[in-house]
């Protein structure tokens, strides 16, 4: 059955890396029996420039009507002076919440060939395979009240609200537990229950769900600051890490360096069964290297692999794409962030050669 994939290339290196994923889809359509129709829409800063807003209602409707959405990245210094709701990043939050994509899967896997590209010693990261399950449509990113108010005495006050309900916590914890069943069954839940009521509720709800419905899951709890430290001390102690929106953002960027580069990490944002998934690299628009043709396309290509697995009905091709990335790395293909010299297109060429 024909599946629809909406591409949202976005800003900076977003279009550069998304173009390489498009080549992979073209190739799989031609040679591997894939039946995916791609369409493309402006998103983020590119949409602000053309349409005045980062996410138009039409683009959101297109996203909801697709089987999967592959996003590049948004943001850049040219839009950083706009009021908050006019920024590219606000469009991304709107897209995530509009799609109901509350569970963000961020696998941090160290490919064997990249064990020496990590900033940690090889013996700490070899074989690393962590799955972050990050809550994506709640917490301090969305809580009200929010804003900057003028106190009138030369002072201003910036406010954001960290807030979670039981059902928001339980539905993402369920995703983590279900995925852990197919792994080693270990889930570590990270929060700050020592100082935050929302963190205490998080811990209690996660534990209660485990006790009621997932007796075989080996659940542990860890304070998020300690989790950050343990990730660089002994990262292989972790299997699935379940955490909230803000801690998940920070801890997954930290974990990216364990795998060699931020340019390697894909993600999938999933909602209720049957809803389209949102797939995106965890990196941003990388304004420092945008336009140079040097960005690593692996995170985008591996995000496409996750789309093949979770939304496009072709887990076999997901494995094939992942194996092609691994083979390219085994053969020494490296972009600059991995210590090599290949440009974006040449790196994708090496991956396509292995397909
Ligand atoms: P960034 O992830 O864009 O870049 C951090 C560093 O990693 C930079 O040195 C960059 O060159 C490097 N890098 C990132 N991706 C790379 C790749 N594929 N290949 C090689 N090197 C890569 O983070 P930042 O600089 O803090 O943010 C820049 C902009 O991106 C901001 O506007 C931010 O809001 C936005 N952002 C967007 C997303 C997203 O769209 N999902 C994610 C993170 C940041
Ligand atoms: C990410 C990004 C986003 C986030 C920003 C751009 C809204 O950093 O996807 O990791 O914080 O979720
Ligand atoms: Mn981030």
Image (cartoon, grey):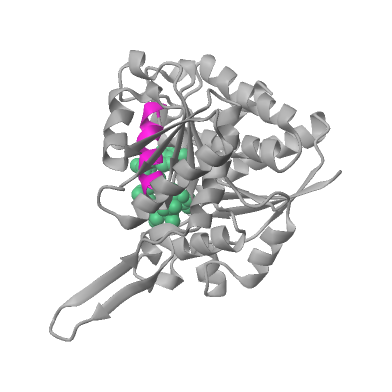
Residue 4 or residue 296, whichever sits in front = 4
How many marks do you count on the picture?
0
Residue 128 or residue 217, whichever sits in front = 217
> Which residue is rendered at x = 36% and y = 56% of the image?
198
Q: Position of residue 320 (x, y in %)?
A: 68, 24
- Outermost bottom residue: 152
Query: Which residues fall within the magenta stretch?
Result: 247-260
Relative to residue 152, is residue 106 drawn left or right? right
Q: Position of residue 44 (x, y in %)?
A: 51, 62
* Whether residue 286 can be seen here: no
> Which residue is rendered at x = 54% and y = 32% of the image?
215
Image: 351 above or below 11? above
Image: 286 above or below 77? above
- Image quadrant in which you'd find residue 327: top right
State the quadrant of the C terminus.
Answer: top right
> Which residue is rendered at x = 33% and y = 37% of the image?
222
Relative to residue 257, is residue 74 drawn left or right? right
Q: Does 223 appear in magenta? A: no
- Outermost left residue: 153
Q: Does 252 appear in magenta? A: yes
Q: Name the chief secondary structure element in magenta.
A: helix
> Which residue is rendered at x = 60% and y = 62% of the image?
42
* Whether residue 164 can be seen here: yes
Image: 290 above or below 255? below
Q: Position of residue 22 (x, y in %)?
A: 67, 42
- Image quadrant in which you'd find residue 197: bottom left
Relative to residue 30, is residue 42 drawn left or right? left
Q: Position of residue 307 (x, y in %)?
A: 66, 41
């Amino acid at each position: 059955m024909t599946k629809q994939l909406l591409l949202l290339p976005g800003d900076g290196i977003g279009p550069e890396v998304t173009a390489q994923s498009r080549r992979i889809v073209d190739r799989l359509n031609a040679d591997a029996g894939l039946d995916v129709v791609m369409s493309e829409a402006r998103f983020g800063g590119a949409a602000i420039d053309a349409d005045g807003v980062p996410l138009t209602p039409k683009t959101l409707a297109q996203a909801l009507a697709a089987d999967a959405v592959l996003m590049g990245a948004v943001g850049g210094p040219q839009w950083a002076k706009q009021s908050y709701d006019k920024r590219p990043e606000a469009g991304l939050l709107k897209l995530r919440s509009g799609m109901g994509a509350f569970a963000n899967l961020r696998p941090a896997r160290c490919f064997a060939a990249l064990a020496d590209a990590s900033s940690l010693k090889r013996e700490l990261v070899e074989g690393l395979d962590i799955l972050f399950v990050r809550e994506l449509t709640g917490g301090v990113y969305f809580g009200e009240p929010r804003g900057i108010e003028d106190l009138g005495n030369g002072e201003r006050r910036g406010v954001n609200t960290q807030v979670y309900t039981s059902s928001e916590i339980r539905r993402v914890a369920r995703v983590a537990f279900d995925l852990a069943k197919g792994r080693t069954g270990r889930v570590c839940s990270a929060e700050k229950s020592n100082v935050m009521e929302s963190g205490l509720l998080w811990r209690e709800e996660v534990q209660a769900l485990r006790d009621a419905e997932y007796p075989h899951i080996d659940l542990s709890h860890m304070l998020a600051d300690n989790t950050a430290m343990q990730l660089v001390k002994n990262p292989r102690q972790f299997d699935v890490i379940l955490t909230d929106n803000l801690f998940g953002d920070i801890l997954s960027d930290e974990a990216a360096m364990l795998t060699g580069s931020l340019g390697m990490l894909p993600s999938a944002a999933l909602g209720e069964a049957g809803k389209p998934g949102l797939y995106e690299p965890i990196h941003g628009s990388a304004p420092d290297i945008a336009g140079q043709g040097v960005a690593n396309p692996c995170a985008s290509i591996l995000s496409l692999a996750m789309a093949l697995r979770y939304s496009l009905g072709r887990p076999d091709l997901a494995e094939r794409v992942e194996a092609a990335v691994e083979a390219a790395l085994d053969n020494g293909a490296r972009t600059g962030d991995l210590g090599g010299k290949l440009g974006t297109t040449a790196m994708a060429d090496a991956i396509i050669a292995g397909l």
